[in-house]
């Protein structure tokens, strides 16, 4: 008996197609848990600070990796909570979110990656009568996909329409028990997380947010409250990888 089997040479093509369907940007397709750096050498910091930075990175990696490995859409087998990754620019929030998304979609699950501003723009563009896309054609995949990565939340100036739209997306996914991963550069002014036991301690030298640049100010109280319900909040505290280690030729987002 003779039968056809997939050639190993097609594995890369299948992976690429899966990432394209998930809308993972080309820049981030190399990201995985293996190449997420957690033992950086940074100049002009104390040994204690360096250890705290790298401990924060390692804790974040282990937490998100465990989440991705244990993900299952079967009721009762997977927590319905997603993850909100908070921290300054360049600490690897997008890297970790994409790594989780890749791990999950390569097991056959559906997933989508959207930049916060890009999603809002795509919805706005659908209102143009010359655009063939409709609002529902943009929103339905976002609402229905098993896992959604919404990157850089709060990056655009808040407006009533934007807050209403994002609130609709998050509320719908929460009510239908679909998992969402979010990243943001904005922290909470009160430094209180949804689950303090999961968070590293704040590191000396890291700037505390003001009311004007807090996550609540960027997305509104209603959305921030919803995020507490639907996500486990994880703060990452470390210097900007791109700025501090740029000479090594490595890039993190």
Image (cartoon, rainbow, N blue to C red):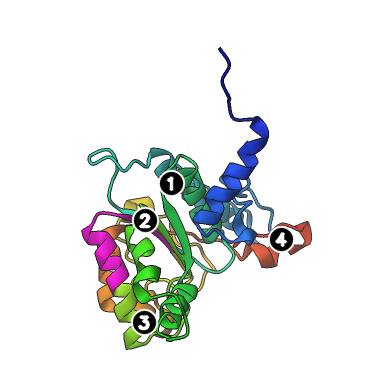
Q: Is residue 44 visible?
A: no
Dot 3: within a 10 Å radius of its alpha carbon, few (fewer than 14), some, or many (20 or more) residues?
many
C-alpha separation, residue under disc 2 versus residue under disc 1: 22 Å
Q: Secondary structure at mark 2?
A: loop
Q: CA distance from mark 1 to mark 3?
A: 30 Å
Q: Position of residue 138 (x, y in %)?
A: 40, 70
Q: Which residue is identified by label 1?
A: 63
Compared to residue 79, the image places residue 220 above or below, namely below
Whether 147 is drawn above or below 157: the answer is: above
Residue at the spot of label 2 = 145
Q: Give the number of the disc on residue 74.
A: none
Q: CA distance from mark 4 to mark 2?
A: 36 Å
Query: For mark 4, what is the residue?
Result: 245
Dot 2 crowding, Cα within 10 Å, few <14, some 14–19, many 20+: some
The x, y position of residue 227, in whole percent, is 30, 65
- Name the front one of labels 1 and 3: 3
Q: Residues within 10 Å of mark 1 (few under 14, many from 20)?
A: some
Q: Earlier in the sequence, mark 4 or mark 1?
A: 1
Residue 240 among those drawn in magenta = no
User: Could you tell me how far apart the alpha carbons at marks 4 and 1 are, in whole angstroms?
Assistant: 24 Å
Query: Magenta segment range?
Result: 168-182
Q: Looking at the rendering, in which quadrant would you find the N terminus?
A: top right
């Amino acid at each position: 008996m003779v039968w056809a089997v997939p050639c190993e040479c097609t594995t890369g093509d299948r992976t690429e197609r899966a990432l394209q369907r998930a809308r993972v940007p080309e820049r981030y397709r190399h990201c995985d848990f293996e190449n997420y750096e957690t033992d950086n050498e940074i100049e002009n910091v104390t040994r204690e600070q360096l250890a705290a930075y790298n401990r924060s990175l390692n804790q974040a990696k282990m937490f998100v990796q465990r989440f991705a490995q244990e993900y299952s859409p079967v009721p009762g087998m997977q927590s319905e909570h997603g993850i909100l990754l908070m921290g300054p620019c360049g600490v690897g929030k997008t890297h970790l979110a994409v790594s989780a998304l890749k791990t999950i979609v390569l097991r056959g699950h559906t997933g989508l990656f959207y930049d916060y501003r890009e999603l809002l723009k795509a919805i706005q563009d659908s209102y143009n009568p010359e655009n063939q896309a409709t609002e529902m054609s943009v929103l339905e995949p976002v609402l229905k996909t098993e896992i959604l990565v919404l990157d850089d939340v709060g990056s655009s100036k808040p407006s009533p329409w934007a807050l209403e739209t994002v609130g609709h997306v998050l509320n719908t996914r929460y009510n239908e028990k679909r998992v969402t991963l979010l990243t943001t550069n904005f922290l909470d002014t009160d430094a209180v997380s949804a689950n303090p036991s999961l968070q590293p301690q704040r590191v000396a030298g890291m700037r505390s947010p003001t009311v004007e640049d807090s996550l609540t100010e960027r997305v509104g109280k209603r959305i921030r409250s919803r995020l507490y319900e639907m996500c486990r909040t994880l703060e990452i505290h470390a210097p900007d990888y791109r700025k501090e280690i740029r000479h090594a030729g490595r890039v993190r987002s």
